[in-house]
Amino acid sequence: LDSMNISSAIVHIVPARLEEACVALSEMPGVEIHARSPEGKVVVTLEDDDTESAADRYVALHGVPGVASVAMVYQYSDDKSDTEEVEA
């Protein structure tokens, strides 16, 4: 089954590594940076078509050098099969 998964998170990054961490985040597929502060708070969205790989992506966010923590703020999933019309 195809599904769509969109979530947002606040990523806390050590300020001294903010630039390199943001470069790494922006290179991750499906990850988009929307805001960042000099103190190291970065707002990102993650878009994926598979809930399991979205969970893997959160694990990957924690592995980016300089990332101190990741806090999910919002998560939305939609099963595409629910919205498709089926001909009988």
Image (cartoon, grey):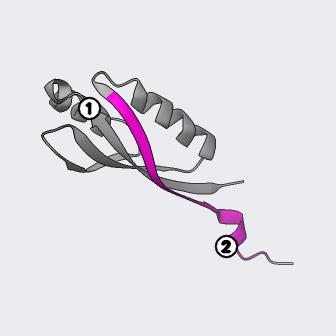
Tell me the tag on residue 83: 2
Q: How far is disc 1 from disc 2 in space, using C-alphas?
A: 38 Å
Residue pictured at 16% horizontal, 45% vertical: 37
The N terminus: image quadrant? bottom right
Whole-percent x and y of residue 15? 17, 30
Q: Does the magenta portion include 34?
A: no
Q: Residue 26: image x %, image y %?
A: 28, 39
Q: Earlier in the sequence, mark 1 or mark 2?
A: 1
Please determine whether, in this image, residue 78 is positioned above or below residue 38.
below
Between disc 1 and disc 2, the foreground one is: 1
- Label 1: how many Cα within 10 Å (few below 14, some 14–19, many 20+): many
The majority secondary structure of the magenta stretch comes to strand
SS under mark 1: strand
Left or right: residue 47 compared with residue 43: right
Q: Front-most of 23 and 62?
A: 62
Figure check: 62 above or below 34: above
Residue highlighted by disc 1: 13
Range covered by the magenta-colored residues: 68-86
